[in-house]
Image (cartoon, rainbow, N blue to C red):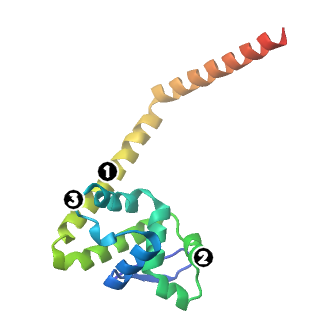
Amino acid sequence: MAQFTDIEGTVWIVDVTVWTIKQLRAKLGVELERAGDSDEESKHILSRIFIDPVFLCDVLFVVCEKQAEKNGIDDEAFASVMKGKVLADARKALIEALINFSQSDGKAEVIRRGAELMSRSQQLVIGETLKKLNDPKTEAFMENDIRRGLSDLFSNLLDRSE
């Protein structure tokens, strides 16, 4: 069974069942079981899991809500222990649970492949962004832009003072 550990050491079991699907629909209006479907709305479910930590946390809280209730943990307390590597591990656990849930309808491989592509895309964007940020031309451009902005600001201030 899929699981992750939060920053306080609590182990959360992530299991997507028909009950959790019903709860996600009722509480968040999210049809998680449609991840992997071909319509536009369904395509965005996986991407939101990867790019929106608040969405991910909301979904996970509903999925783990019974455990949270047993431990006296509310939505705020749950979200407060979700950051950094915990979010990445929790995302992996949710994807694994969704794949397990989707075995019967054949979408498991679509979800697995979609998650792999989303993960690789994120890493590619981060890598390319770091290359640009570490490029001396970028630093020179930013410095020139700041100098130009400050020059314009001081020119406007001097014009007003006359």
According to the picture, the residue beneath numbered tag 2 turns out to be 77
Q: What residue lies at 80% left-to-right and 13% top-to-bottom?
A: 160
| Percent coordinates x, y for residue 13 in the rendering | 41, 83
- Numbered circle sitting on residue 121: 1
| Percent coordinates x, y for residue 31 in the rendering | 34, 70
Q: Determine the secondary structure under disc 2.
A: helix
Q: Amino acid at mark 1?
A: Ser
Badge 2 crowding class, 10 Å Cα cut-off, few under 14, some 14 to 19, many 20 or more, is few
| Image-based side of 70 in relation to 22, left or right | right
User: Can you name the residue that lies furthest to the bottom here?
Assistant: 70
Residue 90 or residue 42, whichever sits in front: 42
According to the picture, the residue beneath numbered tag 3 turns out to be 38
Query: How far apart in space, not on screen, are marks 3 and 2 (Cα)?
Result: 35 Å
Badge 1 crowding class, 10 Å Cα cut-off, few under 14, some 14 to 19, many 20 or more, is few
Vertical position of residue 127 compared to residue 24: above or below? above
**In the rendered structure, which disc, 3 or 2, sits on the residue that comes first in sequence?**
3
Q: Determine the secondary structure under disc 3.
A: loop
- Numbered circle sitting on residue 56: none
Q: What residue lies at 84% left-to-right and 13% top-to-bottom?
A: 161
Q: Looking at the rendering, in which quadrant would you find the C terminus?
A: top right
Q: Determine the secondary structure under disc 1.
A: helix
**In the rendered structure, which disc, 2 or 1, sits on the residue that comes first in sequence?**
2
Q: Amino acid at mark 3?
A: Ser
| Percent coordinates x, y for residue 16 in the rendering | 34, 80
Viewer-side label of 2, 1: 2
| Image-based side of 19 in relation to 100, left or right | right
